[in-house]
Amino acid sequence: MTQPDRMELLRRVVAEHGQAEVARRIGKSDSAVCQVLSGKYQGSTENILQRVEEVFGQSTVVCPIVGEISLGKCAENRKRPFAATNPTRVALFRACPKCGGKP
């Protein structure tokens, strides 16, 4: 998904769910979302828009371990700490940093 597509997705989900709810769900402040929408955000909008796509987008990636999954599930797997609870979890922990959720 391109940056303009992500920005459009952000506008659409803010209109649907409200700015505060979107901010809460992506783990950012309400003011950061407001600044991104108004074009006044001082930092890079890349991470915020990436998170919007992970949480609200319909994008999928092909995981080398579990096959096709949503980008959100991929991001969730990448953030999980190591736990030797089952072989799949161990394999994901090893593979996710190398893959990085690329389609």
Image (spheres, rainbow, N blue to C red):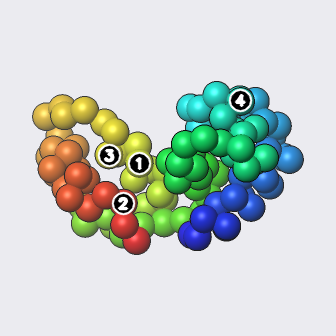
Q: How far is mark 1 from mark 2, CA to CA?
A: 7 Å
Q: How far is mark 4 from mark 3, CA to CA?
A: 25 Å
Whole-percent x, y for residue 86 in the image:
17, 40
Task: Determine the secondary structure under disc 2.
Answer: loop
Verify CB contact (< 8 Å) between mark 3 and mark 2: yes
From this view, report whether residue 29 is shown above or below residue 79: above
Q: Which residue is mark 3?
A: 78
Query: Which quadrant holds the N terminus?
Result: bottom right
Q: Residue at x 71, y 29 (%)?
A: 30
Residue furthest out toward the right = 15
Q: Label 3: few (<14), some or many (≥20) within 10 Å?
A: some
Label at residue 30: 4
Q: Earlier in the sequence, mark 3 or mark 2?
A: 3
Q: Which residue is mark 2?
A: 101
Verify CB contact (< 8 Å) between mark 3 and mark 1: yes
Task: Determine the secondary structure under disc 4.
Answer: helix
Marks 4, 3: nearer the viewer: 4
For residue 24, say whether it is visible: no
The amino acid pointed to by label 1 is: Ala
For residue 16, say whether it is visible: yes
Whole-percent x, y for residue 23 in the image:
67, 34
From this view, report whether residue 33 is shown above or below residue 15: above
Q: Earlier in the sequence, mark 4 or mark 2?
A: 4
Verify CB contact (< 8 Å) between mark 1 and mark 2: yes
Front residue of this view, candidates 62 and 98:
98
